[in-house]
Image (cartoon, helix red, strand yellow):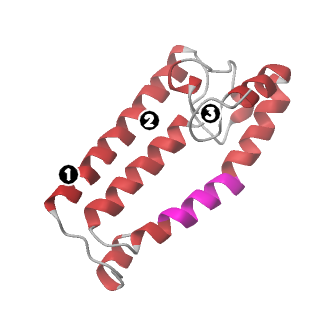
Amino acid sequence: MWWLDRHAPVIRILSVLWTYVGWALIAVGVLMDSVSVVAFIRAKTTVNPLRVERASHLVVTGLYRVTRNPMYLGLIALLSGWATVLGSASPWLVLVVFERVLVIFQIRPEEAALAARFGPAYTQYARQVNRWLGRARS
């Protein structure tokens, strides 16, 4: 992101207002990630997305009522904030690619593992709550 901003900025947005928006997005991302990790710790289940088989509980409260992936959404918010603070359009290309790679190589396999581990409970939860944001339509 930084390299693209410095060497291929495309469009430069340097307004102080945008910098404040960027820092606010970073703060929201850090807060979402922190709250999500605390929810996993309270449920006494693994936070490690590479060890889904160690999950002992399906967390569906707190932020998990409105997004199945608040930790990843927090990371996307943080990176969106950083792209905004950098002040050009090109870092957003990295963010779009990152989101697609994240879904294909991490989220989809993780969802399959959770469905195998928690069965109908996860399937019902996935029907009710969208991957990124909002309650699913009934």
| Mark 3 lies on residue | 68
| Amino acid type, callout 1 | Tyr
Determine the secondary structure under disc 3. Answer: loop
Q: What residue is pinned by disc 2?
A: 33
Q: CA distance from mark 3 to mark 1?
A: 28 Å
Name the spot of residue 62 as percent of width and height, x first.
51, 19
* Residue at the extreme bottom: 7
Q: Quadrant of residue 129?
A: top right
Label 2 neighbourhood size at 10 Å, few (<14), some (14-19), many (20+)? many
Tag 3: amino acid: Arg
Residue 29 versus residue 90 in the image, above or below:
above
At mark 2, the secondary structure is helix
Is residue 136 or residue 68 the one in the foreground? 136
Is residue 99 located in the magenta-colored stretch of the structure?
Answer: yes
Whether the residues at callouts 3 and 1 have beta carbons within 8 Å, the answer is no
| N-terminal-most mark, 3 or 1 | 1
Earlier-in-chain disc, 2 versus 3: 2
Pinpoint residue 65: horizontal percent, then vertical percent: 58, 23
Which residue is label 1 attached to? 20
Q: Is residue 96 magenta?
A: yes
Image marks 2 and 3: residues in contact by CB distance under 8 Å: no
Q: Quadrant of residue 54?
A: top right
Amino acid identity at mark 2: Asp
Magenta residues? 95-105
Q: Residue at x 80, y 39 (%)?
A: 112
Mark nearest the camera among 2 and 3 is 3
**Vertical order, 82 against 94 (above or below):** above
